[in-house]
Amino acid sequence: MPGSNANGHRSRILLLALLAGCGDDGVNPFDSASGGSGSTSSDSVSDTTAASTTSGVADSTGDTSDGGPIFDLEAPPDIDPTGVPPSCEVVDELDGVGDCRISAPAESFNPQVQWTWNGGESAVTPLVANLTDDDGNGTIDLCDTPDVVVVTGGLVGQIHVLDGATGSEHFAIPGAVHSFVTPAIGDIDGDGLPEIVSATPVGFFNLAFTAFEHDGTPIWTSEAVWPHDQGGAVGIADFDNDGSPEIYGDGAIINADGTTRFVAPAQTGWFLAQRNTATTAADLDGDGDLELILGQSAYQHDGTEIWNDPSVLPGYPQVADLDDDDDPEIIVNNSGGITILEHDGTIKFQDMRPTGDPSGLGNWFRPSTVHDFDDDGLSEFAVSSATHYSVFFRNLTTMWSTNVVDGSGWAAGTAFDFLGDGGAEAMYADEENLFVFDDMGVPLLTVPRSSKTLIEYPVVADVDNDGSAEIVVVSATNWDDVQTSPTVQVIRDAEDRWIQARRIWNQHTYHVTNVREDSTIPAVEVPSWRELNTFRTNAQIEGGTVCLPPPAG
């Protein structure tokens, strides 16, 4: 049910669309017969109000036939948008595009399905990165169309690389990967091109890492394994600041060549909670390098234990500054509820269940999203508790809570300021629908999808390089073993008026500063809780920082 302290939508700010235009083709998301690649029609999805849901058909706008830049809105009279060229390379520490200088209409929310792709079922988070040379100039850079990377299949799955503008499949990687583990994308070998790192089953309850070149060529499969059942995720980070990133999953850290760096002891607790998590990396002690955060425990990259507290149930960790002291806190969502730790492992809150939903692995054991949802300059966090999706203030009081149907898995959400008013719209995909919520928890958008839900969540990125954000959501079979929606749906504003997002989403624990737009990994990662104070959300771009609101703190 909607809560209090919610602000109405205010003025909308839109980024100048600087980059080369892409096709406007799409398909009907409700047509189960639409097949394996994009087609040539675009259909509106439900644009909802608090009382009703409607749907209809909207024609695409904007002429992209000449391949030139798209300018969705009229620029202020003192700005000549045609004089601002696109950037094909990262121009600051993180990003490759310009600033926010165009105002959007007050109600710029007309969602439309841009394309769909049918290729089986997917229950892991889709990723976005530039993997193909679309303009044929011999270089993969930010002027190429981003690609959507999706994993399909049962226990043994396959990676597919799809064109971000049309949904057509570039290629599938034949190597077997675990379809319940979200891969990661990043340049791990310093060649300027991204690699894809996934996991492959070893026996029934163990995984090894496996790496592929940007074109799907196998590189190596590691000997290191970590115990796993389902619902894991791979991450990439340069833990020791040496310019050669490491790969991590659960408690294992391996080098860029697949050799083992360190494997942490297993967390204690129910074995399913130990074996299903998306661990993350952050500089907890301010020394510039990164530590591995499991939740119940945390370790230096050389294996030195920072803390290990068995009273903290194993769960999903995420990092944010929740008390404005410049040090990060760790939000751990586990079967007991919400636990918040200081950067040194000291417990601030433990096993809190603000909605009153009961404890249990099927309820609170889910990743969180951190963002400023109400434009007050302070970040809040959102998480599901199976029957509710809720946004909580830092003191764990409820901003709003709304009903969802997701008792089956460990899905997460995201958020994005589509309209440029400073507050973000929350997103969550339950077993039946993708929801985009306003600042009172009322659905602005409801898109049918199906899944038993596992570790997947919708992501927001500029997948077609048109200077406007899109939403990517996947589907799988439901509990009746029926898949009612396409494997992948990409949703845009019909007039491409949504605020610009980065053109990358490289891993499950994405937090903007962990990767540059060109998929290279920073040797020294800027602390996300100081620059953006977000986690599992994308950002509007202005020199590597958000446009609105100003960075927290």
Image (cartoon, rainbow, N blue to C red):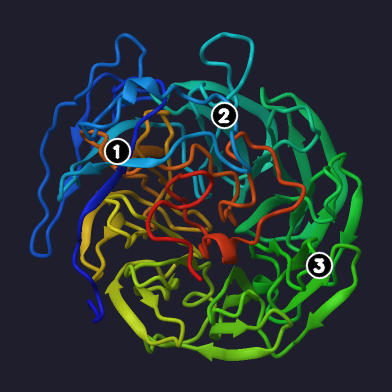
Is 133 left or right of 287, judged from the image as shown? left
User: Looking at numbered disc 3 in the image, what kind of residue is underneath it?
Assistant: Asp
| Distance from Cα at disc 1 to Cα at disc 3 | 41 Å
Residue 138 pos. (x, y %): 64, 10
Label 2 sits on residue: 130
User: Looking at numbered disc 1 in the image, what kind of residue is underneath it?
Assistant: Arg
Earlier residue among tags 1 and 3: 3
- At x 45% / y 44%, what residue is drawn? 541
Label 1 sits on residue: 492
Residue 148 pos. (x, y %): 50, 34
Residue 292 visible, this angle: yes
| Distance from Cα at disc 3 to Cα at disc 2 | 32 Å
- Helix, strand or loop at mark 3: loop
Is 475 left or right of 437, judged from the image as shown? right
**Are circles 3 and 2 on residues that touch, CB within 8 Å?**
no
Label of residue 287 in the image: 3
Quarter residue 183 falls in = top right
User: Looking at numbered disc 2 in the image, what kind of residue is underneath it?
Assistant: Asn
- Helix, strand or loop at mark 1: strand
Vertical placement of 467 versus 65: above or below? Answer: below
From the image, state whether disc 3 or disc 2 is nearer to you: 3
User: Which quarter of the figure is the N terminus placed in?
Assistant: bottom left
Earlier residue among tags 1 and 2: 2
**Are circles 1 and 2 on residues that touch, CB within 8 Å?**
no
From the image, state whether disc 1 or disc 3 is nearer to you: 3
